[in-house]
Amino acid sequence: MDPQAPIDPKQPVREILDRYPHLRSALASHGLEACCGGQHSLEQACRAKGVDLAEVFGDLQAAHAAVEAHSLVPPAMSVREVRRRFPATIPVLARYGLGDCGGEEGPDEPLAWFATVHRLPLEEFLRDVRAAAAKDAAASPPPPASEAAARPFSPHFILGSLALTLTLGATTGMINLLRIAAGADVPISHRQIHGHTQVLGFATLFLMGIAFHALPRILGIGGARPRFVRAAFWLMFSGVILRNAGQPLGFYPAGRLMSLLSSLAEGAAALLFARFVFALLSAVRDGKYDRSDPLLRFVAAGTLYFVLAMAINAAQGIWLAGNLETALPAPLAEPFYFLALQGFLLAWIYGFGNRLVSLFLGVGPAKRATPQIALIFQAAGLALGGAAFLPWFSHGSERWLHDGGQALLALSAAVYLIGHGFLWRHAIFPAMRVPGAPMVAIRLAFGCLGLWSLLSLSAVVVGAATEFPARNLWWSDAARHVFSIGFLTLLIVGMSFRVLPVFSGKALWSPRLAYATYALILLGTAMRLLQYPAAFAPVFYEIGSYMGVPVVLALLAFTFNLVRTMRSGPHAPRSEARRGAPAVRVSTLPVRN
């Protein structure tokens, strides 16, 4: 017998039950629970019943180990701690798609939190993890890292998107605004490449990086990334640079060629990304996600909108290659922004917000049918708004189609926000507290989405009901920047500070710098809103023209904080004495049992 065994075969059965009552069922299965009144030793009782002592002892040890594992691996224990204490659990975690959600520099998120995010059958998952922990393999060499664990989070998408916005995107936009306020003429082509960079070079490239890493894990398909990920990055990154170089030089053959190559490279990157997404969606295991799950529907719809937007982008490249004019016509420029911003990016945010933001905030799931209604309104709004750019509609029909589409999109955002309650609902479930208050930033970002919805609806209603020109370019431009800066950029910043430290296993370098980042983004958004009173007093436009300064400063602070975070050392382990008893964290979303 094992000298380290907590059960002594020479101990009376009654004393074993008094000390280990959880072994009663194991003894009863062999008819030993009440043998001879429990007076005899386990060894004597087995001999009297004619059962094998080694078999009984093995069952008792297994039952005892399972109970110990249950107490040693509570749902609130972090994945990193589970891996450190019980290396035998690493293959189990990898099998469930959590192979790289931990490690020596892994996150401090609770085991049950990851199970909820990945939509795992919680009880089954915990049972398998505890069974592996019960083997007590801590003294054995850890098993070799899985392929998923060998592929850590790669930040090149994130850093590449930040490099583009700080050089050709937000910074260029800031310079354009300052030049316009000073009375200089800024070519339309320069404004268009600024928007192109912000949409594809910043927001899309950033989302692609997160999706390539996180989507397989959330869907429970594992962490291995396809080989073409880096090719997709370089195609999109170089395509954005080529457009910035080629479009302003469209009167030269080299410039027109660069614009064509740009659309080809960006289109190839989009097709690789779409192939990745739809392959994942088709591989989702039955029972883990229902096919009607809002996350799957929003991701599928958003990716379809992305493909349509990139088809328009390809048409832009062809048009620029065949014309000496450097400014794209509105029917080619506006539908692209429309589908990319309020189709692709918004649908993906809807999907991940429905799945993750509720969990992060601890506010619980959305009201019944909220995601479905938001999805329908968004699809109808995009169809109407997109039809407004088709050439065979009259000017009056075009206006009503555009207004109807914009109103439906605004209603989609309103329904989504009201149903989820991100703006006012307090946490009803315990939620993780992390440095830098990223959840405050996320709430503020959704507040900007609500403001954009209100501004868009107001413009449509006032313009239709009165003679006031509420649908003028200044006001629509201000509303668009509330969406792109106040909502989209602030959400990217907040979500990055929430999840990227998890991916890299590092603590946020400077929470105070994070607070400054949020304040600067909101300041820039508020300054852009001065375009509303500027219609009556031009001095407000001069003040608002400086909005690019706080936005660029915010992106610089964000980049610096993020780089320092990813280059810092791992979390210093905290002892249980310092942490105190782990808080019980309840899932805010359903899991399959």
Image (tube, rainbow, N blue to C red):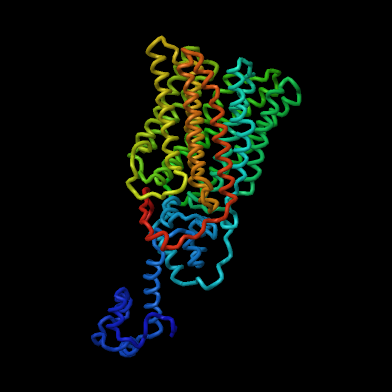
Residue 197, can we see it?
A: yes
How many discs appear?
0
Residue found 56% across the figure and 46% down from its top: 212
Give the position of the N terminus as an image quadrant: bottom left
Examine the rendered structure and indicate whether residue 569 appears above or below residue 474.
below
| Residue 571 in the figure: left or right of residue 250 | left
| Residue 548 in the figure: left or right of residue 52 | right
Q: Position of residue 530 (x, y in %)?
A: 47, 21
Residue at the front extreme of this rendering: 512
| Residue 498 in the figure: left or right of residue 589 | right
Residue at the left extreme of this rendering: 37
Examine the rendered structure and indicate whether residue 485 appears above or below residue 145.
above
Residue at the right extreme of this rendering: 253
Examine the rendered structure and indicate whether residue 549 appears above or below residue 210.
above
Examine the rendered structure and indicate whether residue 54 appears above or below residue 363.
below
Which residue is nearer to you in this view: 146 or 566? Answer: 566
Q: Position of residue 43 (x, y in %)?
A: 35, 88
Q: Position of residue 73 (x, y in %)?
A: 41, 64
Which residue is nearer to you in this view: 339 or 66? Answer: 66
Residue 292, can we see it?
A: no
| Residue 374 in the figure: left or right of residue 527 | left
Which residue is nearer to you in this view: 442 or 319? Answer: 442
Q: Position of residue 393 (x, y in %)?
A: 51, 15
Give the position of the C terminus as an image quadrant: bottom left
